[in-house]
Amino acid sequence: MVLGKVIGSVVATQKDESLVGKKLMLVKAIDLEGNLLEPFVVAVDVVGVGIGEKVLVVNGSSARMTDETRERSIDSVIVAKVDSINIS
């Protein structure tokens, strides 16, 4: 999993049928202080997040393990909205 921040959204009116009805968000990885890192990914949002929120993203075959993404051409999925980060 990657800790990230939603920086925008993607609108695609013509797309593969497996992506119809899916919300696509631009996510950049962040460090523990919240600084944006390179690169960005386009991730399917299955939890209902908004721009500016911290999230957890899974990539690769793990991205196709949720009920909404199984058997679809998806490589990155937002699987959680991060409420807080506690560092000891």
Image: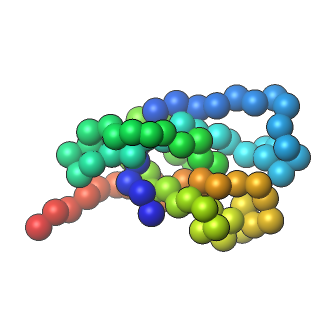
Q: Can you say whether 65 is above or below 40 in the image? A: below
The answer, for residue 67, to whether it is visible in the render is yes
At 16% across and 63% down in the image, what residue appears?
87
Q: How many marks?
A: 0
Q: Horizontal placement of 73 versus 5: left or right?
A: right
Does 87 sit above or below residue 21? below
Residue 66: image location, x then y, percent = 66, 68
Residue at x 20%, y 46% (from the top left corner): 33
Q: Residue at x 70, y 29 (%)?
A: 11
Q: Quadrant of residue 65?
A: bottom right
Q: Residue 32's spot in the image, x, y percent?
A: 23, 51
Name the residue nearer the viewer: 18 or 75.
75
Farthest residue, direction front: 39
Quadrant of the rendering where the N terminus is positioned:
bottom left
Q: The C terminus appears in which quarter of the rendering? A: bottom left
26 up-or-down from 32: above or below: above
Instruction: Kindly give the residue lying farthest to the right in the view shown.
Output: 17
Q: Position of residue 70 (x, y in %)?
A: 75, 66
Looking at the image, residue 71 sits to the left or right of residue 5; the answer is right
Q: Is residue 47 visible?
A: no
